[in-house]
Image: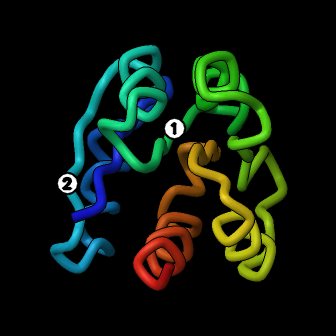
Amino acid sequence: MINIVVGGQMDKQQVSKLIEKYGEGKVNISVKSDIDAALAVKSGQAHYYFGSCATGAGGALAMAIGIIGAQQCISVSIPGQILSEDQIKQAVNDGKIAFGFVNTDAEKVIPILMKEILNK
């Protein structure tokens, strides 16, 4: 099983439901505060961190960047811009483990992220 924590500041329940929908029964999902979620990844209790906010960066990833490290985090969407499917896949394959995105882009980026994580 792949352990995924949902942090960030917005729409945690929606994000969790989308991860479950696209997780093909192969994921455990925990919804936590952004600090607790980042600590879970840092300690090895979780494999991946998903966070959403209005900008896809600050509230979505700030604690993950501070705790896990910027080199393992990426904003896959910011207002008005979503990374391409190939860029998102590349981020997963490059070892990124914390993903931030604009809450309204969740339905666009989570299917791509989950497909690539499950294929890894």
Question: At label 2, which amino acid type do we have?
Answer: Asn
The CA span between labels 2 and 1 is 16 Å
Question: Number of labelled discs?
Answer: 2
List the residue tagged with mark 1: 51
Residue 108, x across and y down, in percent: 56, 69
Question: Residue 62: which disc?
Answer: none
Residue 93, x across and y down, in percent: 68, 71
Residue sitting nearer the eye, 40 or 85: 40
Circle 2 — which element?
strand
List the residue tagged with mark 2: 28
Q: Find out whether the residues at labels 2 and 1 contact each other: C-beta distance under 8 Å.
A: no
Sequence order check, earlier mark of 2 and 1: 2
Look at the picture and state if 103 lies above or below 66.
Answer: below
Circle 1 — which element?
strand
Residue occupying image coordinates x 77% and y 32%: 70
Question: At label 1, which amino acid type do we have?
Answer: Gly
Residue occupying image coordinates x 48% and y 71%: 117
Badge 1, how many Cα within 10 Å: few under 14, some, many 20+?
many
Residue 5, x across and y down, in percent: 35, 40
**Quarter that holds the N terminus:** bottom left
- Judged left or right of residue 47, residue 89 is right
Q: Report the coloring of the rendering.
A: rainbow
Residue sitting nearer the eye, 120 or 50: 120
Residue sitting nearer the eye, 10 or 66: 66
**Front label number (2 vs 1):** 2
Residue occupying image coordinates x 83% and y 57%: 81
Residue sitting nearer the eye, 28 or 85: 28
Look at the picture and state if 57 lies above or below 22.
Answer: above
Residue 50, x across and y down, in percent: 48, 44
Residue occupying image coordinates x 78% and y 45%: 79
